[in-house]
């Protein structure tokens, strides 16, 4: 019995010593070998296989390393593509209706920037004449030191330019005749005073809006109510019955915008073109027009048709997480414009041009945003500086540019085409146009060579937008990475769980098991160790007199003491509880 217990005890002591040494090199090698034998990764079990030769193990080890390197190479290519071009622009699968988008803003400018009859009333030596020269972009007299302000320039501009009610003779929209002064507003552009239709009201266009931003006072009673609109937010859920910017009335020239214009060629004084007629720009209602560079010319005495095609670009919210420098577009709440409320690339470029002119020329051109209310208006003596700055801004080869003006993530633009023909009118000519006949008679003070007819209209009721979205989101990147790892070495999410288990959970559980076994062994050792019983300190008592004991002494039978009693009676006896 004792001989059988000794080998068992030796075996248990050996296993205990082995468990107590899990942190040794030998234990770590055993753990690694166990992981290689049971891992789900392809090829690792051959490295720990004892039934194959060492060269075979080395072969599988080298193969596994090469597979890891090759998969890392392909994953790095996927990551580079993901980080370099995370945005993809695709055509939307859903068609949009033109009735949900505003009809474009149409800005019309007479090529003549000042009426001759009104300029003749201005003295050549007055300060107003120097401001007029800056309007006409003429003269470079460096001796002029007059400092122009927006207040005086605004008064001069309204005084010399052709009013909208004189230029617009007839207006209709959506097959209904409209009062031109009701639907067109005066606006200041780089071509002077112009008339704009369906543009956003200045109270929704500028940040720090004041009544001084208007060229003409707001009418007290108007049929159409001004509302806010942005390419990103769109229209509000509830709209009044009559509002602007208004939506399309339908397709075709009958349901579009039709205007009859009077050029008044006999009043021409100064112009930026070598012809007479009008310059027209079709643009976003939330942008101020820059007609001089981007408008098209319609000569007087001609009828023009301008079909319009909306181009809408939107974005998915997921691209917000991509850096601005990578996606290269801005959301409306990310804009840092000082003067405009709605961000667009055109508005940003106007602000950038104003800041550069203010920095280099210490003035701002009359049509640019007044980012500094105290800044003076550029005059004829500043023409050399302003021309140089504008040339450098428009050139892409100079450092003075507005490259930081990225497009908006939501933008609405319009693509137009133009076709025109000579107006033929007279009593012997029957026209199918539903226009008042008195417009083309000489009794109204104008000839047919001064008139122009413009038709703006949509071709279709629906169109497709383009959407900016993530080309490689985190889900796509994870899918591509997982596919490559699974293809090369059978890697999966469970492989990560296995590695985590062998690195953290298994050592922790092993250490806990060792600690519990150690505690049980210590408890067993305490049970088998002899325990010395404490002796009680008994004070000696004085025996009673013998006389008191007489008659009380009884003979007691002698009992043989037991082994336990004999041990207790000995000095400092040893107690073994397991004997009980």
Image: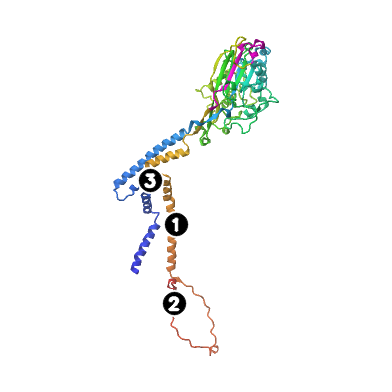
Q: Nearer the viewer, residue 522 or 317?
A: 317
How far, Cα to Cα, is label 2 from label 1? 42 Å
Quickly name the residue at label 2: 564
Q: Nearer the viewer, residue 479 or 346?
A: 479
SS assignment at label 2: helix
- Please tell me how crowded label 3 is: few (under 14), some (14-19), or many (20+) other residues with Cα within 10 Å: many
Above or below, 331 against 414 in this view is: below
Q: Find the magenta span and give its range.
A: 436-462
How far, Cα to Cα, is label 3 from label 2? 67 Å
Residue 134: x and y in percent read 62, 17
Tell me the residue at 43%/56% (across/down). Answer: 511
Answer with mark 2 or mark 1, whichever residue precedes in sequence: 1
As drawn, the label of residue 41 is 3
- Please tell me how crowded label 2 is: few (under 14), some (14-19), or many (20+) other residues with Cα within 10 Å: few
| 466 lies left or right of 277 | left
Residue 450 highlighted magenta (yes or no): yes
Answer with mark 3 or mark 1, whichever residue precedes in sequence: 3
Say if mark 3 contacts mark 2, CB within 8 Å. Answer: no
Residue 487: x and y in percent read 38, 41
Q: Quadrant of the C terminus?
A: bottom left
Outermost top residue: 428
Residue 521 highlighted magenta (yes or no): no
């Amino acid at each position: 019995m004792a001989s059988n217990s000794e080998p068992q005890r030796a075996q248990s002591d050996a296993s205990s010593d082995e468990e107590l040494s899990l942190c040794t090199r030998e234990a770590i090698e055993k753990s690694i070998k166990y992981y290689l034998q049971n891992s789900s990764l392809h090829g690792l079990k051959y490295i720990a296989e004892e039934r194959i030769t060492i060269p075979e193990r080395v072969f599988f080890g080298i193969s596994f390393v090469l597979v890891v390197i090759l998969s890392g190479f392909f994953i790095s290519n996927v990551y580079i593509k993901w980080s370099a071009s995370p945005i993809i622009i695709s055509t939307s699968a859903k068609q949009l209706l033109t009735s949900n988008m505003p009809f474009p803003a149409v800005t019309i400018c007479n090529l003549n920037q000042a009426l001759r009859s009104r300029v003749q009333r201005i003295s050549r030596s007055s300060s107003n004449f120097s401001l007029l020269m800056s309007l006409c972009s003429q003269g470079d007299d460096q001796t002029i030191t007059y400092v122009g302000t927006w207040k005086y320039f605004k008064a001069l501009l309204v005084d010399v330019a052709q009013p909208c009610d004189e230029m617009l003779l007839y207006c209709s929209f959506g097959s209904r005749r409209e009062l031109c002064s009701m639907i067109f507003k005066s606006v200041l552009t780089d071509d002077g005073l112009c008339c704009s239709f369906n543009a956003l009201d200045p109270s929704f266009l500028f940040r720090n809006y004041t009544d001084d931003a208007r060229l003409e006072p707001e009418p007290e009673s108007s049929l159409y109510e001004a509302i806010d609109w942005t390419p990103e937010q769109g229209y509000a859920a509830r709209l009044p019955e009559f509002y602007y910017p208004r939506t399309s009335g339908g397709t075709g020239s009958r349901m579009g915008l039709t205007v009859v214009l009077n050029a008044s060629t006999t009043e021409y004084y100064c112009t930026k073109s070598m012809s007479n007629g009008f310059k027209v720009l079709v643009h976003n209602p939330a942008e101020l027009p820059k007609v001089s560079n981007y408008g098209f010319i319609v000569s007087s005495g001609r009828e023009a048709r301008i079909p319009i095609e909306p181009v809408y670009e939107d974005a998915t919210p997921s691209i917000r997480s991509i850096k601005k420098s990578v996606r290269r577009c801005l959301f409306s709440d990310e804009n840092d414009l000082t003067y405009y409320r709605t961000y667009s690339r055109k508005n940003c470029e106007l602000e950038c041009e104003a800041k550069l002119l203010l920095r280099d020329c210490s003035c701002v051109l009359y049509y640019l945003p007044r980012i500094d209310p105290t800044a003076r208006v550029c005059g004829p003596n500043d023409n050399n500086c302003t021309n140089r700055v504008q040339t450098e801004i428009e050139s892409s080869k100079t450092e003075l540019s507005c490259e930081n003006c990225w497009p908006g993530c939501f933008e609405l633009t319009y693509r137009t085409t133009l076709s025109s023909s000579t107006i033929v009118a007279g009593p012997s000519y029957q026209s199918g146009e539903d226009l008042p006949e008195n417009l083309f008679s000489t009794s109204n003070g104008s000839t047919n060579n001064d008139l122009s007819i413009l038709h703006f209209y949509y071709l279709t009721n629906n169109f497709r937008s383009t959407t900016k979205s993530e080309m490689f989101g985190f889900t796509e990147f994870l899918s591509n990475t997982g596919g490559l790892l699974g293809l090369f070495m059978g890697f999966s999410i469970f492989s990560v769980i296995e590695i985590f288990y062998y690195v953290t959970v298994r050592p922790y559980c092993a250490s806990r098991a060792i600690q519990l076994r150690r505690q049980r062994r210590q408890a067993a050792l305490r049970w088998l160790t002899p325990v010395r019983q404490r002796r009680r300190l008994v004070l000696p008592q004085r025996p009673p007199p013998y006389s008191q004991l007489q008659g009380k002494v009884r003979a007691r039978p002698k009992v043989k003491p037991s082994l336990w009693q004999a041990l207790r009676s000995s000095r400092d006896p040893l107690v073994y509880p397991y004997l009980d």
